[in-house]
Image (cartoon, coloured by chain):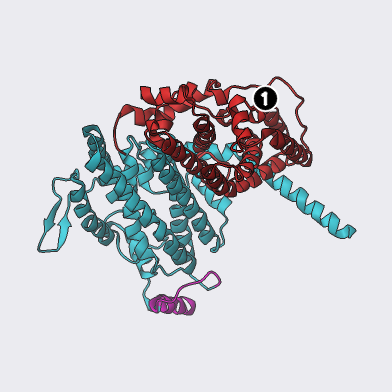
Chain colours: A red, B cyan
Amino acid sequence: MTQLLTSINNDHDALNTYILRMADNGLILGQRLCEWCANAPVLEEETALMNTSLDLFGQARNWLNYAVDRDQRLQDCDAIAMLRDERSYLNLLICEQDNGHFADTMARHYLFDVWHRLTLEELCHSHDETIAAIAAKSVLEVRYHEQRSRNWVLRLGDGTQLSHERMQTAINNIWPYVAEMFDQDQLEMELMAQGIAADQTIIAKQWHDLVAQTLIEATLKTPPESYNQMGGKQGLHTESLGIMLAEMQSLYRAHPGATW
Amino acid sequence: MYAQMVDTGVKSLKHRSEMSADEQAFMARIDNESKIEPQDWMPDAYRKTLVRQISQHAHSEIIGMQPEGNWLTRAPTIKRKLQLAAKIQDECGHGQYLYSAAETLGVGRDQLLDQLHTGKAKYSSIFNYPTLNWADMGAVGWLVDGAAIVNQVVLQRTSYGPYSRAMIRICKEESFHQRQGYEILLTMMQKGTPAQKDMVQDAINRFWWPSLMMFGPNDDASTNSAQSLAWKIKRKSNDELRQMFIDQTVPQLEVLGCTAPDPDLQWNPETGHYDFGEIDWSEFFNVIKGNGPCNKQRLEKKVKAHENGTWVRDAAQAYATKQQAGAATKKEAS
């Protein structure tokens, strides 16, 4: 456990940090979607929410397996998922935000999905072959996620007066977590220079164009620029994450060393 | 299947001589094992019985998501979480096919859900028991899905075509769930710590009797069963199915190294079946009446999800109407 945390926190292995950032986005957003189980507005959405969660967990497992292959000190996927506290999680803040109501979930999803799809498309050309392969597999699923969440932004934005207001508020509330997706720290700049990481400057432009177009079509307004919340990729999270991890990890941690 | 005590609305079986010409022709088709299809003539009571049975089955699949959803966020490994999410997703899909099968009998999904939400329609008693440890995810798969399969395999030959075809599809997924459930328990028993083994035995102790109750009351207490058998909606009686389930389950229980909470359970070489103790029918009828440990919470959660989703469904409808109007305007202009 100590060794696991040390290896993640003080690691000079930039590539593994990058891989864990991708993995954690899937784990954390996948976990949030699990919370919807038996609470969705219609049966078809129960299936879709479960399915999306499954995709994200599956992708996370692929990323985690790669991280473990590269660094045996990480033990296995489950140890990485279940034994880290919030300060060692490297997901984007947008992924951990509370589900709220259906518009909050779908607004969060759409803004993340567009980024996720664009990033994975870039990563399909990564010089790291495993990253390219995982991205190529994941992007097929994420294209559907984006299509679906975009449809809900349109339906709720241009549905009834109430749904319009709720979707606009949801977009406004999640907006401060957008800029972090494109914020590249030193680590990502170096990996990008090596042709491994995705270039977020290109992605940011495409993202803003696509999202602006969807919001217009959905009769919604792009929120004005405001203060941006950052830090998830460096392990500095919002308070939502700790409680969610406590639940997710409770059984695994209660039985150290157990086989399930 | 997850339907119990489905009311046929029939007090006693009719003799052929009491039947109309339509009914006689209908019964001749049933006797010849030809499937009844939605457009075919059928007695009203047959139609109503099917709607009750299929919708009760559908509601059970949907409510059945709750006891498993209870552990989804806490699944101990990524693999187990993926399996459980996939299982829950399958169950929701089964609910969807079954509502569609019921729709072929002229009743809409909204109407059926309304009956569930207002407490007029039932779902299987088994889902009114709580899931209290992780081994319950194994026990539900192995015992609950296992009991359902015993019924459903037989129902693949049920007389109503759409129901029979839905069962064929559902059976494939259910048997996968059962094996997965058993594997959860086997892993805990063979590789687990003492605490994990205790969880498995505890789960079996709690789910054993309620699983046996899933087949419904004894045959001699059920006139509905006789009519459903005559119509070949049901193909085997409650007691026959229960015995089949016990006979196939006990050897699996022994492989696990666990016991059933029934001191009277033992092999009877004369009958070639396992004898078992008396089921506590007062508990069964109490749960059916709404007094089980989770009846209130299950229904409240379902109703709340439906009510909380009203504005979303309204928005989707309003958006679709606008899109259709937009498309019509474009068509006129061109």
In this picture, residue B320 sits left or right of residue A10: right
The percent coordinates of residue B13 (x first, y second) are 36, 68
- The answer to whether residue A142 is above or below residue B274 is above
Q: Secondary structure at mark 1?
A: helix
- Residue B38 shown left or right of residue B179 in the figure: right
Answer left or right for B194 relative to A188. Answer: left
* Placement of the C terminus of chain A among the 4 image quadrants: top left
Which residue is located at x 28 percent, y 56 percent? B221
Q: Which residue is situated farthest in the left direction here?
A: B270
Tell me what residue is drawn at x 49 percent, y 66 percent: B162
In the rendered structure, the answer to whether residue B269 lies left or right of residue B39 reads left
Magenta span of residues: B18-39
**B245 versus A134 height, above or below:** below
Q: Front-most of B17 and A25?
A: A25
Q: Determine which quarter of the picture holds residue A150.
A: top right
- Above or below residue B11? Residue B315 is above
Rendering coords of residue A191 (x, y %): 59, 32
Residue occupying image coordinates x 23% and y 35%: B198
Residue at numbered disc 1: A176
Residue B316 shows up from this direction: yes
The question of residue B130 being in magenta is answered with: no
Q: Amino acid at mark 1?
A: Pro
Q: Let me know if residue B118 appears in the view.
A: no
Q: How many marks?
A: 1
Q: Classify the position of the N terminus of chain A by image quarter.
A: top left
In the current view of this chain or complex, which residue is farthest to the right? Answer: B333
Residue B256: give x, y in percent of width and height.
21, 47
Q: Say which of B178 and A94 sits in front.
A: A94
Quadrant in the rendering for residue B224: bottom left
Q: Is residue B20 magenta?
A: yes
